[in-house]
Amino acid sequence: MRRKIFVFLLVVMVMVVLGGVAQAEKVKLRWMFHDSGPAIEKAVAAIYEKFIKINPDIEISIEYVPWEVAMQTVMTMVKGNTLPDMGRVWPVGRRPFRENSLVRHE
């Protein structure tokens, strides 16, 4: 009986250890902005720092795309299936997304 209990506890400990290893892997996200500049980059950095403190298991790569080529870049990403996980689009910039059935919610 003691042996069965020992084996059971050993199996539970192994599962806990392996479960902890599996949970240690960080989630990686891409966050894209269609503009940059000192004010925007400062605001994004502040948001990023607060988010990371609350969510240390999430890693975010921030990408800035110049406004002049933002729509072309995004549509190229759509065609290549390489869209970022998060992004920002101004209301006037939503039209191409609606026209191509790429928007779920507005």
Image (cartoon, rainbow, N blue to C red):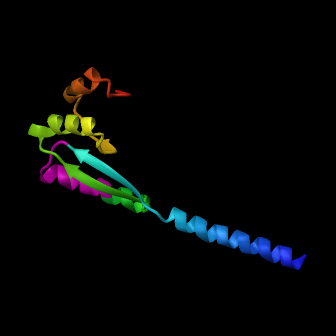
Viewport quadrant of the N terminus: bottom right
Residue 80 in percent (x, y) is at: 26, 39
Q: In this view, does 49 lie to the left or right of 6?
A: left
Question: Relative to residue 53, is residue 9 depicted above or below?
Answer: below
Furthest-right residue in view? 1
Question: Relative to residue 27, is residue 105 depicted above or below?
Answer: above
Residue 105 in percent (x, y) is at: 37, 28
Q: What stretch is highlighted in magenta?
A: 34-48
Q: Which of 11 and 39 is in front in this view?
A: 11
Q: What residue sits 59% from the left and 64% below the top?
A: 19
Question: Relative to residue 3, is residue 35 depicted above or below?
Answer: above
Q: Nearer the viewer, residue 49 or 71?
A: 71
Q: Is residue 6 left or right of residue 52?
A: right
Asked if the stretch drawn in magenta spans residue 35, the answer is yes
Q: What residue sits 39% from the left and 62% below the top?
A: 53
Residue 5 in percent (x, y) is at: 83, 74
Q: Quadrant of residue 78?
A: top left
